[in-house]
Image (spheres, grey):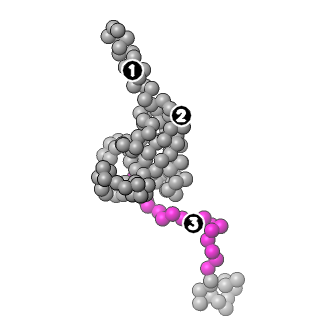
Amino acid sequence: MCEGCFGERLEALNIQRYVYDDAFIYVALSEDGALSAPLSKTTRRTQKNKCFKVKMSSTDTINDLKIQLYKQTGQTPNDQLLYRELGGSLLDGDSTLFEARIEKNNADQPLILIAQSMSAVSAKYDEQQPRAPERGFIDTALAH
């Protein structure tokens, strides 16, 4: 195989790593911009709490990934910062996963999610139970 053919073949194999349909992308939640413990010794329970698994295709954008993360975390896409690695550059929301060179099944090196404002998991409006009126409002029209 000549050197030119070898280079083309190597480039084709490199591109194949980043082309996929319905593959899992792993995203680790980082609190305060730093991972609290090394990832080497994690149990399934702690990994489940800090790592999210999302089914995506290489043609999906980073914004699509943020929307899928919003469904799992309740954190709005505007408050999500996604990095390839801690201390790396911020991933552009308009670029596709292929353009950002995100590999499939990246459980050993998940993307890093930093939430700018941590919000507790909010209950939906229909799941909230009505509160009893406070003592000062019982005899007023506000109690009804």
Give the CA distance from mark 1 to mark 3. Answer: 49 Å
Quadrant in the picture for the N terminus: top left
Instruction: Say few, some or many: other residues with alpha carbon within 10 Å of mark 3 (under 14 / 14 to 19 / 20 or more).
Output: few
Query: Horizontal placement of 118 versus 128: left or right?
Result: left
Write the residue at 50% across / 32% down: 20
Residue 21, by quadrant, is: top right
Identify the residue position indicated by label 1 in the image: 11
CB of mark 1 within 8 Å of CB of mark 2? no
**Amino acid carrying mark 1 in the image:** Glu
Query: Between 79 and 33, which is closer to the camera in this rendering?
Result: 33
Magenta stretch encompasses residue 110: no
Instruction: Say few, some or many: other residues with alpha carbon within 10 Å of mark 2 (under 14 / 14 to 19 / 20 or more).
Output: few
Query: Between 123 and 26, which is closer to the camera in this rendering?
Result: 26
Write the residue at 45% across / 37% down: 104
Q: Look at the image and tell me whether residue 81 can be seen.
A: no
Residue 123: mark in rendering: 3
Residue 21: mark in rendering: 2
Give the CA distance from mark 3 to mark 2. Answer: 33 Å
Residue 133: mark in rendering: none
Q: Which residues are magenta?
A: 114-131
Magenta stretch encompasses residue 116: yes
Query: Horizontal placement of 76 versus 82: left or right?
Result: right
Write the residue at 52% across / 42% down: 55
Classify 72 as above or below 85. below
Which type of secondary structure does the marked residue at label 3 adopt? Answer: loop
